[in-house]
Image (cartoon, grey):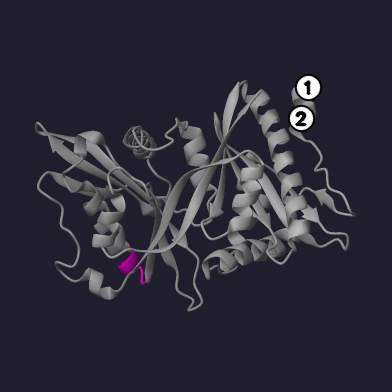
Amino acid sequence: MAAEATFDPEVRLTGGWASRVPDERDIAVLAELRAAVTRRATGLGAVDVAPVLSEVTEAGSWTRRQRVALDPSGRVRAWASAHDRAAGRALVQLTVDPALDDGDADAVAAALLTWVEEVSHGILAVRHLDVTQLDAGAYADDPRQSRWLAAAGYVLARRWLQMRRPVTARDLEPGALPAPRPGVSVRRVERRANGLPVARDVQLAHRVLEESFADHFNSYRESFPEFVHRLMENPGHTWDHWWLAFVEVDGAQLPGGALVSTVLPPDADGVAGSYVDYLGVHRRARGRGVAKTLLGTVIADTAARGRHRLGLEVDADSPTHADGLYRALGWDTAYVTQSWHRDLRR
C-alpha cells in the first residue's frame, strides 16, 4: 500500500498556484512553452504539437507520470514528467515558462522536482528495484534549469552536441558520399506488404544497437519491448527509416551496425527534415567504415525525399571523437545540451 500512496502524489504548490494532470486542452500551450524554452536558450525552437500530443494523450503518455502547474489566474505555466523508460532509468522532463520571474519560477520548479522524486519512488516500487537513475536535461545556455537541477540533487554528467547538416540534391551526385568498403553492405529493415517490419530485422537492430553501445557512457540494458514502444511513440517514426549494416567475416555476412532515423517536422519554409536517433557499430565491425556507410545512406535518403536538413546528437566527450567524423561529413554544432543525473534509492 505504501508504494501506491507514493505513485500519484500531489504537487505541493503555494501562493494560489495549483496543479493537475495535463490533457487535450493543454496541447497547444505546452508545445508553445517547450518552444519558448528552446528559443530562449538556443535561438531556435519552432512550435511542434505532435510530440506533445503523443506524450500527453497518446502512446507516449502510457509510460509517463506528469503534471502541469497553473498560476493563480489558471494559466498553465510549467510542466513536469517522469518517464519510466526502462528498468533502472527514469527520464525527467521539466519545462517552466521563461517569462516567469525568478521567484515564481524557482518555487514552481522546486515543487515539480520534488513531485518527480516522489512519483519516481512509486516507479521504483512497482518495478521492484532498489535504485534508479533520474536523468534530466538542460540546455547549456539555460542557467536557470541548471540551477534548479543542482538544487534538487542532480549532478552534471555529460554534454551533448546537437548537430545539423544541410542536405541538397548535390548529395545524390556520383562520388558525393562515401562508398561502402569491400565486405560492407547496407539494406533497409525488411518490411511486409502492409508496411510493418519483419520481426527478425527489428530484433536484430535492437540486439546490434544494445551490443554496440555496451561500452558507451551510461550504457544500460533496454528490453526489446521498451525499445520498440519508445521509438514507435515518436510522431516522426517510420519503419522505412531503419537500416542494417553487414560485414563479411571469414566468408560469412554478420550484422555490423544499425541506424534508426525519424522524420523532422517541416520548418518555417515548409520542408521536412530527417534525424538520426541511433547509429551503432558493433565492436567486430569497427574500423571498416560502417558508420560512414550508414551515414552516407541516410544522407542520400534524406536528399532523395526532397528534405534539406539532417540532425543528430553526439557525446561531446566521446572517447572515439565521433563528432570529428560528423564534421568531416558536413555536420556543424547548432547548440549544446546537458544530462543531469541523480541516483534515487528506496
Residue 47 placement (x, y as % from top left): 60, 68
134 relative to 335, above or below: above
Residue 52 placement (x, y as % from top left): 63, 56
Alpha carbon distance from label 1 to label 2:
7 Å
Which element type, helix, strand or loop, lies under badge 2?
helix
Residue 47 horizontal side relative to residue 331, left or right: right
Q: Are marks 1 and 2 in contact (CB under 8 Å)?
A: yes
Give the extent of the magenta segment: 302-307
The amino acid type of the residue labelled 2 equals Thr
Q: Residue at x 48, y 79 (%)?
A: 269
Is residue 137 highlighted in magenta? no
Q: Residue at x 81, y 56 (%)?
A: 70
The crowd level at tag 1 (other Cα within 10 Å; few <14, some 14-19, many 20+) is few
Is residue 304 highlighted in magenta? yes
User: Is 56 or 76 nearer to us in this picture?
Assistant: 76
Residue 337 horizontal side relative to residue 134, left or right: left
Residue 247 placement (x, y as % from top left): 17, 40
Q: Residue at x 79, y 36 (%)?
A: 9
To which residue does mark 2 refer? 6
To which residue does mark 1 refer? 2
The amino acid type of the residue labelled 1 equals Ala
User: Is 84 or 45 nearer to us in this picture?
Assistant: 45
